[in-house]
Image (tube, rainbow, N blue to C red):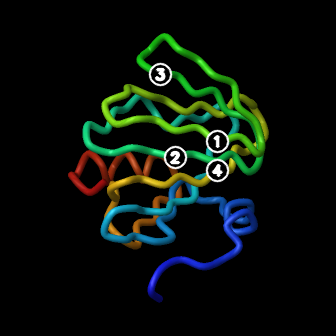
Amino acid sequence: MTGYVGPIEKTTEQNNYFRRVIFTGKHAQLVVMCLQGGEEIGREVHDTVDQFFRIEEGSAKFVFNDKEEHLVHEGDAVVVPAGTIHNVINASENKPLKLYTIYSPPNHPDGTIHKTKDEAEAAEAAGHH
């Protein structure tokens, strides 16, 4: 396929994996994510990557630079500029948070699937984002 064409909202809502790369282009990457109740992506920073998030189901707390916090809900979007320390936390203890994100440029190997956060952390520790 040349690019990505599809029902992104439905694809995001049906995804139960922590991270699943849907499309990787030369300058952008589309990824769906699901965080379990209380789960977080973890504090991170991308020095050369801008990141767009769209919440499709649930609520999330975004923390920027360890001090600025934003509570966002279904239908909201967040852009994290390169160089911003950030974390995304599922605001619910028992409902999943379903979102999609666009990395520009891509941040993970094409085709990446991390079924759980533990699997994602193991891959990152091994040098495979």
Q: Secondary structure at mark 4?
A: strand
Marker disc for residue 69: none
Marks 2 and 4: in contact by CB < 8 Å?
no
Marker disc for residue 52: 2
Label 1 vs label 4, nearer the camera: 1
Q: Alpha carbon of mark 3 to alpha carbon of mark 2: how far?
A: 14 Å
Residue for badge 3: 64
Q: Earlier in the sequence, mark 2 or mark 1?
A: 2
What residue lies at 66% left-to-right and 43% top-to-bottom? 36
Q: Secondary structure at mark 1?
A: strand
Q: Secondary structure at mark 2?
A: strand
Q: Earlier in the sequence, mark 3 or mark 4?
A: 3
Marks 4 and 3: in contact by CB < 8 Å?
no
Label 4 vs label 2, nearer the camera: 2
Q: Earlier in the sequence, mark 1 or mark 3?
A: 3
Q: In the displayed structure, does residue 4 sit left or right of residue 83?
A: right
Marks 3 and 1: in contact by CB < 8 Å?
no
On the image, the x and y values in percent for residue 114 come to 46, 59
Give amino acid for label 4: Leu
Residue for badge 1: 77
Marks 1 and 2: in contact by CB < 8 Å?
yes
Q: Quick check: 18 above or below 65?
A: below
Residue for badge 4: 99
Q: Secondary structure at mark 3?
A: strand
Q: Alpha carbon of mark 1 to alpha carbon of mark 4: how far?
A: 9 Å
Label 3 vs label 2, nearer the camera: 2
Give amino acid for label 2: Phe
Q: Alpha carbon of mark 1 to alpha carbon of mark 3: how far?
A: 15 Å
On the image, the x and y values in percent for residue 118 come to 45, 46
Q: Nearer the viewer, residue 92 or 86?
A: 86
Q: Quadrant of residue 32?
A: bottom right
Give amino acid for label 3: Phe
